[in-house]
Image (cartoon, rainbow, N blue to C red):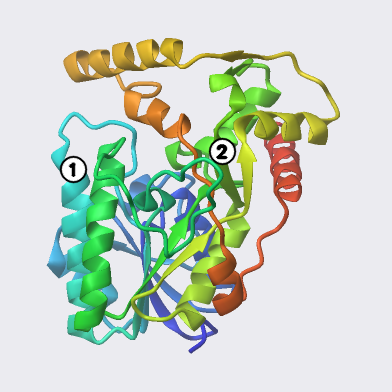
Amino acid sequence: MLVESGVQIFVTGGSGFIGRELLNELLRRGCVVNAFVRDPLRLSGGAIDGVNYIQGDITDKESLRRGMSGCKYVFHLAGYARNWARDKKIYDEINIVGTRNVFDIAVELGVERVVWTSTIVTFGVTPKGVVGDEKMVRVSDQFFTEYERSKAEMEREALRLSGEGVPVVIVNPTRVFGPGLLSESNTVTHLISMIRGGRMPVVLNYGRNIGNYVYIDDVVTGLILAMERGRIGERYILGGENVTLRDFFSMIDKVDRVKRFRWGIYYLTPFLIAYISEWLADVFGIYPVFTPGWVKTFLADWSFSSKKAESELGYKPIPFEEGIRKTCQWLDNVKR
């Protein structure tokens, strides 16, 4: 099974940060690509030459059937991942119902394989000193965000459906960063830009908490490897290095060869700002800079290993420092 020239592929979420980079890579390989989008005329970053854009919505099975018809493989990346929504039902409508629809139509049309992009947060936070992997059992039913809850619920269902005839392979990217669309889903690159521009002089919780950071090109490669070599019904963590927030800031200084002044802050101030922001959003519709759930997420540890993807798929992420350097070089070129 190869993702190669002439293979017809259906992609949802192709207008997003990861999705656009995946479309470019599939075109580079000579694939015939059907990208499923809500409005081809309002694409962030513009249309990509060579992509067949299919207008539709994953909550509408007929439009999915029209776009997926004739395709051998499906990459399902579409999801609602924004920090806030006035109507919380949208998380379930897109992340759960929409994903079910993709699976249903794929089975109906005889698609050979679906690679679904979930998220690392479905595993839950990692205890101090623990590095999680695909065998890690989520120990809490409490969720920081509606996004986390809806994706975790759908992931449990997807694992069950894989044993009932749905040919799904699940990938769980960690915190993705790098060149590409500067949308809300590319938050880490936004953060890098803010740090370099002196607009982020504070470090939440004194930078103690750990996250796993992965370069965008590695995630795209991992998606394709999961299509080619992944086992049906299995999950694969697509990550890079585990880094404290303090070391994240320090690495940017190292790459830029500068020492920036910053200070650590306790979590009470960000929580206060977050609750006020969320209240303004709920009452007046002013989109929040960040929410309490976002703060709680960054006050937890998310330390994970990609050894399963490395051993089974041949996944080889680049070093964190190299990813930061490439991202900084790209940001410099964007400003010119």
Image x and y of residue 165, in percent: 22, 84
**How many numbered discs sit on the rendered protein?**
2
For marks 2 and 1 on the same chain, the one whose residue lies earlier in the sequence: 1
Element under label 1? helix
Point 46% across, 17% down: residue:
267
Element under label 2? strand
- Graded by Cα atoms within 10 Å as few (under 14), some (14 to 19) or many (20 or more), the crowding at tag 2 reads many
Name the image quarter holding residue 112: bottom left
In this view of the protein, which residue sits in the foreground, 8 or 240? 240
* Horizontal side of residue 260 vs 102, given as left or right: right
- The amino acid type of the residue labelled 1 equals Ile
Q: Is residue 113 above or below residue 135?
A: below
Whether residue 165 can be seen here: yes
Name the image quarter holding residue 336: top right
Name the image quarter holding residue 294: top left
Disc number placed over residue 148 in the picture, else none: none
- The amino acid type of the residue labelled 2 equals Ile
Point 42% across, 81% down: residue:
231
Q: Is residue 284 above or below residue 88?
A: above
- Graded by Cα atoms within 10 Å as few (under 14), some (14 to 19) or many (20 or more), the crowding at tag 1 reads some
Image x and y of residue 278, in percent: 28, 19
* Horizontal side of residue 38 vs 185, given as left or right: left
Image x and y of residue 130, in percent: 53, 49
Whether residue 49 can be seen here: no
Disc number placed over residue 90 in the picture, else none: 1
Q: Which residue is mark 2?
A: 210
Q: CA distance from mark 2 to mark 1?
A: 30 Å
Q: Is residue 89 above or below residue 84?
A: below
Image x and y of residue 67, in percent: 27, 71
